[in-house]
Image (cartoon, helix red, strand yellow):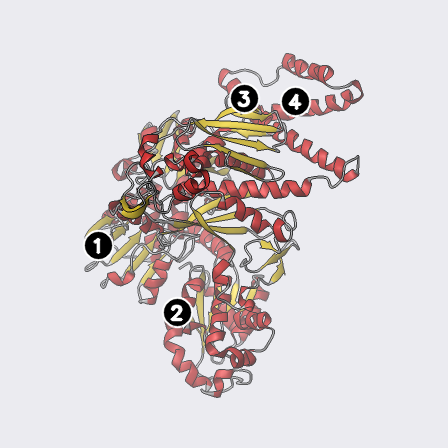
Amino acid sequence: MAGAYGKNFKVTLGGTSHGPEVNVRIEGVPEGTVIDYKELDYFMERRQAKGLDFATGRHEPDDINWRRGVLNFGGELGIVSDSVIEAYVENKDVRPEDYERFKEVPRPGHADFAAIMKDGEKAEIAGGGRFSGRLTVGLCIAGGIAKQILEKRGITIFTDIAEIGGDDNPIDFEDLLGAAQGQKDSVGGIIECGVMGVKAGSCGDSYWDGLEGRIAQAIFGIPGVKGVEFGSGFEGTRTMGSVNNDPFAFDEEGNVITLTNNHGGILGGIASGMPIVVKAAIKPTPSIGKEQQSVNLKTGKLEKISVTGRHDPCIVPRALPCVEAAVAIALLDALMEEERPESEGDTIEALRSAIDRQDDIILNALTERFKAAERIGAIKAAGGMPVQDETREREVLKRVEEKVPSEYEAHARAVMETLIEESKKKQIKSKAPFGILGRKLGHSYSPEIHRLIGEKTGNPYEFQIFEREPEELEAFIKGDEWEGLTVTIPYKEKVIPLLDSLSPEAALIGAVNVVVRQEGKLVGYNTDYFGFIHSLEMAGVAVKDKSCLILGQGGASKAVLQALKDMGAQKAEAFSARKPDEIPGEDVEIIVNTTPVGMFPKTEGMPADPSAFPKAEWLIDIVYNPLRTHFLCKGKEKGLKTLGGMGMLVAQAIYAAMLFTDRVIENRERLMADILSEIKEDVENIVLIGPAGIGKTTVGKNLEEITGKEFYDTDLLIVQREGKPIEEIFSAMGEEGFRRLETQIIKELAEKRGAIISCGGGAVTGEENYFPLAMNGRIFLIDGENTAEVATEGRPLYKEFTPEELRKQRLGLYNRWADEKVDAAGKEIGEISEYILEKFNFMP
């Protein structure tokens, strides 16, 4: 066996890479726990990295076989029936002969040498033996089950690739892997894992029972992991304590939170209630074709070696679910530790703990019962059968008499009668809802937009999110869960073969973003086309006779390309953002980004450098979260006109709503403006910049009073955090130290939505401050030439410069940053606030 982990949820891995099987033994899963096979199979498929161009040529189906402890339930679910689960996966695609040589000449970077030194002639070298990544099959089986248990407790775990080969730009990953493979080499990377929903104090302890140590031990069990970091980790060591510490506060419900999360959700080894953030460093794949020096253990001479066979140039994509599995196992083990009764006997605490465990079993079973009831309802509806079946109801109630002791029979019968009634409700199928179909839709504004459309037109309709994986697409489209759909990445083209017909514009474009049922047929439309045109017209973008460039070649780019041609563009072409050398820039006047680069949460990326287009007039981005992408911000800094994607999103939704409801919406421009205004009010920040002492703080407080939005003053936050006035901070740290604090505060405030932010007079001197403020903020410059009355006390820079001198030094930066300018000379605070709110009614 490869070793065991855990005290309460105990996982033991076994087998070897090229032996008959790999296996896992899991102890501690509560009997009655329901395992969703489909969800577990999908988790296992992620470990295989199916579909990746650079994955190993070794193909294993990873079909799970239950040896003990799981009863099969209709082929879709498993019910845990024992305190011990044993599962195995057969190794079918094996080639142990490929590894014979390495018993004498160990591969650099592998465990070969250490294994031989430890185990001698018994050492299993083929595929890495018990040290192989193949054993993560067992890890993922256990971790997949742990994830399902945690999700039922409201705890979610997710991962993403933070870096590959030292590069953190996802657009470069494919090229890096291709280059490594072409050089017969490999690269490593960093995986970031986040955990949401772990309650403060719910698990962890001090020293060796600390949550960091338990999680780190589990992650280090993954072959290839060479480092684990929590929160700000090593980067935090390069800051001051005052910067790295996370200030405490209360949220709207009175819960204690921290304003930042440098501690990564764990304090003193105990969960703090904030998201747990952990990174795992994965070394480059050691098996490479490039020639390396080794030693021949038999001859005692140096020897060159190059590894042939089936190996990934990077194991990071495969390791994503492995890290999730390790974290899930560690968390569940720690949580179960807290739930274990401290003493034997019938104490209230022990009995309540037992009740809680039984409740979990009951709730899991109820969920599956209601799902089955819904499926029965669909079958009955298709066959014209009545929902009520009195014979079946009598059979269910008779089982109460057979299975429940007489002293509990009356209570159990009452529960079952209620359950029968609730199940009948699930069988009564209401009209299917409308919704948005995509793969990852956690940050979609579409449900809110469609709610507003229904509300403002007096014709409300239900609109849901449908997240589906590619293998689920066909069954979903041909199913009856929905009445109409808006379709987003990555299905705008993939959905076409599943439809009965296309509207003229969708057929011409070759992409669909709306599907509706019409007379029993599935018809595809493209409202992106109309939405894009409408948003450009609203913003005053003149396309006629212009040279236009589209970044991206997906489904959205096709709609944009056709729209630009139909609007009279002199030239319009689409290019891949992944091939910057092929993108022309010399004569381009209008650039449209249709890629997801720069979209939340990875907001720093840009599909291209605006500087590459010397004749550019407009930069347009169909990304709508953030409101203004890094691409647009860079363009604005260079004096270009910019347009974000929120207008297009709302406009296409209005056209989609007309298809859903089969009703014409009049005054679409007014409706679009109203919806944009409401969304902006919730999302967009009001940012105030300008000379010190001009009245920004007073205006901000006044705006807070008028609007109810939260007000933040960067200077005040710095003073509060440092516990000393600005003059003393300057004295201790200098202006450079003060500016670092300012940048950190601004970065934190960038996460706010619908807030009012007042910046210090010198915030504009830090170029890095612009994007965090501008991406979801409208920047107002409050200025006035009469600065003679400005108070200079407590303002260190006024010892060197007069207020007017400092203002003139920064005026160019103020003007470059500003979306709107407010002349404060001779105006009352109320007048300034009124002007800002009037201008704030327009979306950038």
Q: Nearer the viewer, mark 4 or mark 3?
A: 3
Q: Is residue 86 above or below residue 719?
A: above
User: Residue under circle 1?
Assistant: 581
Q: Nearer the viewer, mark 4 or mark 2?
A: 2
Question: Residue 305, percent across and down?
Answer: 28, 44
The residue furthest top is 391
User: Residue under circle 2?
Assistant: 767
Do tag 1 and tag 2 residues touch (Cβ < 8 Å)?
Answer: no
Q: Residue at x 32, y 41 (%)?
A: 105
User: Which badge, 1 or 2, comes first in the chain's sequence?
Assistant: 1
User: Residue under circle 4?
Assistant: 420
From mark 4 to mark 2, how far is it between C-alphas?
A: 64 Å
Q: Nearer the viewer, residue 513 or 630?
A: 630
Q: Specify few, some or many for label 1: CA neighbours under 10 Å numbering under 14, 14-19, or 20 or more.
A: few
User: Residue under circle 3?
Assistant: 72
Q: Nearer the viewer, mark 4 or mark 1?
A: 1
From mark 1 to mark 2, how far is it between C-alphas?
A: 28 Å
- The secondary element bearing badge 4 is classed as helix
Three-letter residue code for mark 2: Glu
